[in-house]
Amino acid sequence: MTTSSSVTRRNRAAARAPWLLLAPFLVLFVLTFITPIVAAVGSSFTRVTRSGLFGEAGVRTEFAGFANYAQAIGDGNFIASLGRMLLFGIVQVPVMILAATILALLLESASARWPGFFRAAYFMPYGVPGVIATILWSFLYVPGLSPIIDVASWMGITVDFLGAGAVLWSIANIVTWSYTGYNMLIIVAQLKAIPGELYEAARVDGATPFQIASKIQIPLIAPALMLTTVFSIIGTLQLFAEPQVLTKVAPAIDSQYTPNLSAFTTAFAYNDYNVAAAQAVLIAVVAFVLSFAFLRLTNREGQ
């Protein structure tokens, strides 16, 4: 007969088992995600004062309150970079999500040929690192190297992809080229989850491919569209590699062109890590607010 004590031990062991399995993940999660966030927030509320020319006379750390945040918000270049990325997101994100949706619908249509090949082809740019992608595209942007600029000049058209008015959209083109295929695969996965019976019933009722897409597919892939849009909004504020690489060939891009570049410059060029931490926290807050506002807006429209 099974005693009550052995049953109790088994129950305790069963209760501990999930935590033992989760322990490696939880440790890594705390070390690589929670700890850096806590450190950044803590650093944003402190100020380090170094005495002497090189800090040889001592270093003092003190509570700064919101002084670092006030300095970050008072930096016109940082605020301008946030506004620039807001404009970037308003234009680039809808274009990319629309392109990804159209590609996904075309690949999942009944008349699509070689869908597997084209899915891989459209996804392939995502596998190219952002730095490499920017270098590749810069050959089409730089005068003297770009065949597009050469052809345009032969036709009497002046094209400046790296000018102050166009370089933001040149970056948007690189980002769209890189991430459209990734978003497309998320949407394709949602499309594959739609029961085939819905398509068969729609065809029996005489629905056209356009009606199937607009009345069945698009409403049912709304969660995937919301997910990809939120990821894209967050990614917009994280833009770093593309403008940093283009600074070598585009004078219009300065060291604070995007919020992440501004925080990077503040930390490693101006050696003001505390203000840079405040900028990083502000970027995270803006990303959260924009994502939350988008989700609230879409949920309200869906009701």
Image (tube, rainbow, N blue to C red):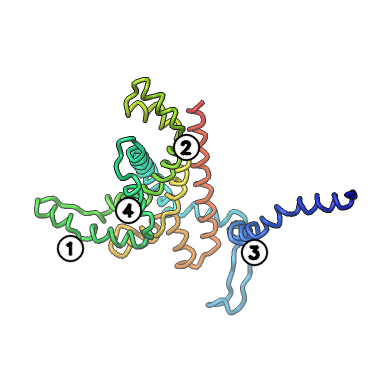
Q: Which residue appears at 33% of the width and 44% of the height?
A: 115
Q: Are marks 4 and 1 in contact (CB under 8 Å)?
A: no
Q: Name the residue tied to disc 1.
A: 144
Give, as a three-letter code, the residue at label 3. Answer: Glu
Q: Earlier in the sequence, mark 3 or mark 2?
A: 3
Q: Residue at x 53, y 45 (%)?
A: 288
Q: Is residue 16 above or below residue 249?
A: above
Q: Tell me the crowding category of disc 4: few under 14, some 14 to 19, or many 20 or more residues within 10 angstroms, Cα based.
A: some
Left or right of 47 in this view: 234:
left
How crowded pointer 1 is (Cα within 10 Å; few <14, some 14-19, many 20+) is rated as few
- CB within 8 Å, label 1 to label 3: no
Mark 4 lies on a secondary structure that is helix
* Residue 133, horizontal then vertical, whole percent: 33, 59
Labels 4, 1: front one: 4
Which one is earlier in the sequence, the residue at label 4 or at label 3?
A: 3
Task: Pick whichever of labels 4 and 1 is earlier in the sequence.
Answer: 1
Q: Residues within 10 Å of mark 2 (few under 14, many from 20)?
A: few
Q: Name the residue carrying label 2.
A: 193
Amino acid at dot 1: Gly
Q: Judge depth for marks 2 and 1 and give the one in front.
A: 2
Q: Secondary structure at mark 2?
A: loop
Label 1: element kind: loop
Residue 51 can be seen, yes or no: yes
Relative depth, front residue between 68 and 162: 162
Query: CA gap, disc 1 to disc 3?
Result: 53 Å
Q: Are marks 2 and 1 in contact (CB under 8 Å)?
A: no
Q: Is residue 126 above or below residue 205?
A: below
Give the mark nearer the N terminus: 2 vs 1. 1
- Residue 263 placement (x, y as % from top left): 47, 59
